[in-house]
């Protein structure tokens, strides 16, 4: 809800117009001042101010699940291939939307800004996507094959955007060279979701990200690209390929750290390097940074940074891991951080039995009271480097979910499942989760079943 709600409100404002939306919100706040109101009340009030069918709009956007699949479609008037760049020919561009749950036949009416980039210029057109297919007006478009077409040009559109093959290929090769910051951000997200749906090979996506992040000046985009890079590396690249890729990736991150201009960018590059490091050379350097034998110019590390660094070194099984953990506990001044580190320490142990004992203690709700501490420990238990030994804990974690809902915070069940499954990519674990879902009794809470599906989404995609 925290991600979709702002999108819904932006689209509601675009549908009504800024003035109508503002005046309607003022009336809503005045009418219901010091009282209670619902979303339905707001839609009923705004519906009086527009010829649009807001009730139908709200059903699609708010009441029902899912999002539209929005695809770019080419047709070439001369009958030539849409990917043929030899000679001029008329190109027709259409945008289609489709309900992922086909039997429902839902439509998400929305304005959409579509951009086509040609060698001569870019043509940007705004359409209203309120039917299955809408043709993009072609006035002024050169009669040549576009370099690429981006159906969500301004990033405001809502849906699962499917690029045409020629555009997809061009953007994978040229993301780093696009001359607009917003466009690079939109394309980054679009390509990432194309990879999630299996239309882009993960290795190619990672190569694109590594080229782009090396030259990206926008800090928000750098942070998103680094986040995607870490996810691709740990979840989407097989372990044997990770080992071969690690030196190049670590060198890129080290270079980014050296050239970053601001403390926040320095921190982003350093955290990414710390979280993917596996080579002996980088781990030895990180240990020198942790021991304060070597500084990172321009980066100030605080106590929480040293704690995380010690724990990341330990989960990688560096030779003196226990000594590092013990010394970090001793030099930690904040009593809460010290207690948290003592709690999590068994989950970092190189001994599988010690890690197993840590997990067993969590079956007692009393030992789950510090939920943030529990989640950190569970995350280390299931770290990708230890995923094979943690497979045995997946089924018990699923079986504990209902009790965790009864005894914990409202957000704890989802976070518990995220921490449990985030390090796993194997078909074996995917089968374990599917078998659990298939054998649930009818009275099992639907909300918990959907939590499992949500947390397992990447696992299912990677395993497939």
Image (cartoon, helix red, strand yellow):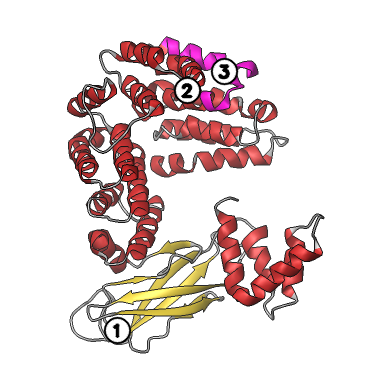
Residue found 56% across the figure and 13% down from its top: 361
- Mark sitting earlier along the chain (3/1): 1
Judged left or right of residue 76, residue 162 is right
Judged left or right of residue 435, residue 239 is left
Say whether marks 2 and 3 touch (CB < 8 Å): yes
Quadrant holding the C terminus: top left
Say whether marks 3 and 1 touch (CB < 8 Å): no
Nearer mark to the viewer, of 3 and 1: 3
Q: Quadrant of the rendered structure where residue 200 is?
A: bottom left
Q: Quadrant of the rendered structure where residue 271 is?
A: top left
The outermost residue toward the bottom is 139
State the residue position of label 1: 79
Residue 171 lies, in percent from the top left, at 28, 63
Please provide the residue range marked out in magenta: 353-373
State the residue position of label 2: 377
Does residue 395 show up? Answer: no
Q: Give the Cα separation between the discs numbered 2 and 1.
A: 60 Å
State the residue position of label 3: 362
Q: Give the Cα separation between the discs numbered 2 and 3.
A: 10 Å
- Mark sitting earlier along the chain (2/3): 3
């Amino acid at each position: 809800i925290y991600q979709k709600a702002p999108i819904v409100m932006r689209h509601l404002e675009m549908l009504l117009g800024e003035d109508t939306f503002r005046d309607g919100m003022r009336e809503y706040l005045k009418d219901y001042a010091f009282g209670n109101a619902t979303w339905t009340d707001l839609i009923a009030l705004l519906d009086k101010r527009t010829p649009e069918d807001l009730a139908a709009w709200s059903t699609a956007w708010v009441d029902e699940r899912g999002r539209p699949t929005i695809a770019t479609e080419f047709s070439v008037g001369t009958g030539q291939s849409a990917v043929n760049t030899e000679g001029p020919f008329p190109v027709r561009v259409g945008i289609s939307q489709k309900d992922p749950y086909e039997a429902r036949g839902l439509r998400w009416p929305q304005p959409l800004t579509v951009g086509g980039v040609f060698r001569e210029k870019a043509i940007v057109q705004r359409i209203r996507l309120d039917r299955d297919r809408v043709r993009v007006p072609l006035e002024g478009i050169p009669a040549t094959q576009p370099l690429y077409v981006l159906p969500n040009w301004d990033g405001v559109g809502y849906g699962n955007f499917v690029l045409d093959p020629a555009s997809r290929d061009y953007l994978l090769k040229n993301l780093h060279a696009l001359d607009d910051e917003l466009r690079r951000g939109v394309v980054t997200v679009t390509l990432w979701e194309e990879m999630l749906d299996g239309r882009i090979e993960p290795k190619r996506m990672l190569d694109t990200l590594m080229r782009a992040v090396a030259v990206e000046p926008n800090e928000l985009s750098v942070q998103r690209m680094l986040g995607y890079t870490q996810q691709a590396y740990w979840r989407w690249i097989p372990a044997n390929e990770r080992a071969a890729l690690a030196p190049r990736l670590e060198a890129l991150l080290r270079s980014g750290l050296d050239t970053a201009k601001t403390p926040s960018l320095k921190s982003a590059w350093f955290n990414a390097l710390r979280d993917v490091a596996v080579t002996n050379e980088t781990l030895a350097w990180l240990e020198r940074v942790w021991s304060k034998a070597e500084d990172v110019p321009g980066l100030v590390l605080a106590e929480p940074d040293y704690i995380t660094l010690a724990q990341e070194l330990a989960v990688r099984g560096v030779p003196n891991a226990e000594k590092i953990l013990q010394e970090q506990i001793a030099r930690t001044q904040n009593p809460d951080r010290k207690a948290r580190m003592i709690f999590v320490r068994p989950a970092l142990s190189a001994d599988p039995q010690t890690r197993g004992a840590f997990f067993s203690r969590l079956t007692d709700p009393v030992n789950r009271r510090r939920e943030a501490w529990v989640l950190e420990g569970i995350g280390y238990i299931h770290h990708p480097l230890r995923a094979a030994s943690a497979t045995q804990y997946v089924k018990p974690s699923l079986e504990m979910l209902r009790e965790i809902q009864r005894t914990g915070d409202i957000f704890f069940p989802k976070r518990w499942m995220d921490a449990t499954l985030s390090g796993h990519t194997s078909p074996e674990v995917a089968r374990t989760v599917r078998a659990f879902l298939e054998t649930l009794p009818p009275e099992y809470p639907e909300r918990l079943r959907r939590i499992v599906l949500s947390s397992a989404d990447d696992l299912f995609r990677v395993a497939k």
